[in-house]
Amino acid sequence: MKISEFQKLIDELYGKRDKKRGLDRTALWLMEEVGELAEAVRKRDKELAEEEVADVIAWTVSVANLMGIDVEKAVKKKYPGKCPRCNSIPCMCPKEPDSNLDFDHDPD
């Protein structure tokens, strides 16, 4: 399925609900799904992460629909077949800076 086909499907399935809910509340739902994906990744639960990845993509497309963004066009513009920062394949950007976040720490 092309991105444009998926975007059309999401609009057909949820467009009316999304419009009624509004952009701000739809964006909040997207953030909820990102949190659920983060939890699945933290737990290393591949099956749950697979579901949450799909949800994050669907809610992202819902936000795009509400804003009138053509997702396929936006993705092609941002990622034109090479890294948008260094213009290389594969990316040759400098290593990401170290973070203060402790990703190895399990909060539970």
Image (cartoon, rainbow, N blue to C red):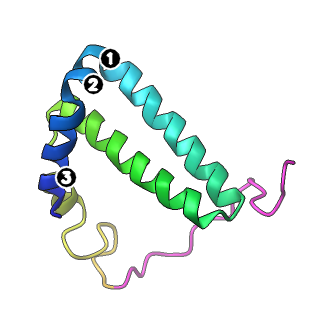
Tag 2: amino acid: Asp
Highlighted range, magenta: 90-108
**Residues at badges 1 and 3 in contact (C-beta under 8 Å)?**
no
What residue does disc 1 label? 21
Q: Would residue 91 be counted in the magenta stretch?
A: yes
Q: Secondary structure at mark 1?
A: helix
* Looking at the image, residue 69 lies above or below residue 37: above
From the top left corner, tell me how far across and down residue 18 is, in percent.
27, 24
Secondary structure mainly formed by the magenta segment: loop
Q: Is residue 69 left or right of residue 43?
A: left
Tell me which numbered mark, 1 or 3, is placed earlier along the sequence: 3
- Residue at the location (17% across, 62% down)? 76
Does residue 33 lie above or below 43 as drawn? above
Mark identifier at residue 18: 2
Residue tagged 3: 6
Q: Position of residue 84 (x, y in %)?
A: 29, 67
Q: Quadrant of the N terminus?
A: bottom left
Q: Secondary structure at mark 2?
A: helix
The number of numbered badges drawn on the structure is 3
Asked if the stretch drawn in magenta spans residue 26, the answer is no
Residue at the image point whose x is 56% and y is 50% from the top? 37
